[in-house]
Amino acid sequence: MTCPKCGHQQHNPVKCEACGVYFAKLPPAPARNAGPAHRRPQSEEPGLGFGAVALTAVLAGLLVFIVMRERTPARTTSAAKNPSVPLTVAPATTNAAAPAAAEPAAVGAASNARKAIEAARSATVFVKSDWGFGSGFIIDEDCHVITNRHVVETDGGRVADRFVQDPDNRARITSAQQQLEAEIDREQQLRRAMVDQPGTNSERLQLEQQIESMQHQLSDLPGQIGDSIRSKVAASGRTGFKVTLIDGTEFDGLHAEYARDRDLALLKLPSSHCAHVSAGNSRQLAVGERLYTVGNPSGLAYSVTSGVFSGERGEGSERMLQTDAPINPGNSGGPLITEDGRVVGINTLVLRGAQGIGFAIPIEAVFEESSFRLAR
């Protein structure tokens, strides 16, 4: 036999005659034939292989479950509609075909709505004066434009008073007064520091003049702002204002007529056969109905925003349309339109201190204004 330890050939089966090892103390022969030690890490591969198989099996089972779960409601719905119909694929196929058939109609309706809104957008104009800007829209093919009176107002006193009394502007004026007071205090400290310094007489005199000028401004800042506004509005009243169409065409030197009791103004473009927006019926609006505003919010020309009709407020000549469609500075005078592109109101104001509460003058007021002499 061969010694498992040293390889000595002999006939003694108990003890090696060369190295003296007892054969009974050695590991059994199969252990020696297990192979080199570096092959042991391969024992992880069956585990990895089993994990991959198990994961595949789980995913396959989950996929089958999902497929079966998705098919079950379709068949159940079909059977529920007609219990006498057997649970076959045919009813589900029939039901599935209905949305496909309805889809072209829905797409067509959406396309028509987009075209109507784009047409109303094309009839919206950008109104700009020397002291502000807003929106308007062409109401007939004779190129009459409707806007808010406050957009094209030429009464400087009214504009100045409205500006100064506006809470937001009053807050800005107060902030400017505080900054002016702080600047005066810094200049006075600098003047005191220059008293004992030689060769600073001219600089000190210039500083005193600056302080006196700022104190004069501080004494009546709201009044000076009002005077500046009145001057700009008066100049605008003489030169007129500008209207720009969506294609870039401009009309300068325009003037408007004003409604007696509403914030409305009417002007006519020196053109003919204008693209215009058709008038709708604001009294037929349903609460929750989708509405759109078109205008120039913050100077972003011809912007379209959407919301819903929230209800009516007031009555008679004070009736207003409430909407959560965004109305921002620059939207004033622009159209409030329905999905079919008809104008139902003139965007006019928002509720201060709240979000998503805007108001529009009903379009009927335009045709009820006798001084405008517009035919519906």
Image (cartoon, helix red, strand yellow):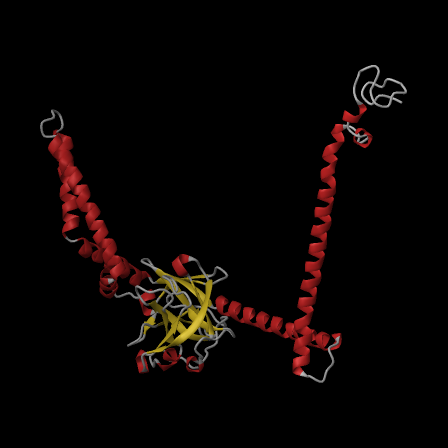
Classify residue 340 as left or right of residue 16: left
Residue plotted at (53% across, 71% down): 116
Report the quarter where the C terminus lies. Answer: bottom left
| Near-viewer residue (237 or 17) | 17
Instruction: Pick out the residue farthest to the left.
Output: 196
The image position of residue 30, as x and y in percent, is 81, 32
* Rendered position, 13 above or below 106: above
Q: Residue furthest bottom?
A: 84
Left or right, 223 with respect to 337, comes to left
The reply, left or right, for residue 312 in relation to residue 112 is: left
Please give the count of numbered marks on the rendered protein.
Answer: 0
Name the one closer to the observer, 333 or 61: 61
Q: Is residue 231 visible?
A: no
- Residue at (28% x, 65% y) in the render: 154
Q: Position of residue 90 (x, y in %)?
A: 75, 76
- Taking depth in this image into account, of 73 and 238 the one nearest to the observer is 73
- The residue that appears at 22% across and 55% down in the rendered structure is 225
Residue drawn at the location 18% of the way across and 56% of the way down? 223
In the image, is residue 244 above or below residue 323?
above
Q: Position of residue 330 (x, y in %)?
A: 38, 62
Q: Position of residue 301 (x, y in %)?
A: 44, 59
**Quick check: 102 left or right of 38?**
left
In the rendered image, the quadrant that contains the N terminus is top right
Corner quadrant of residue 15: top right
Q: Is residue 17 visible?
A: yes
Q: Is residue 325 above or below residue 207?
A: below
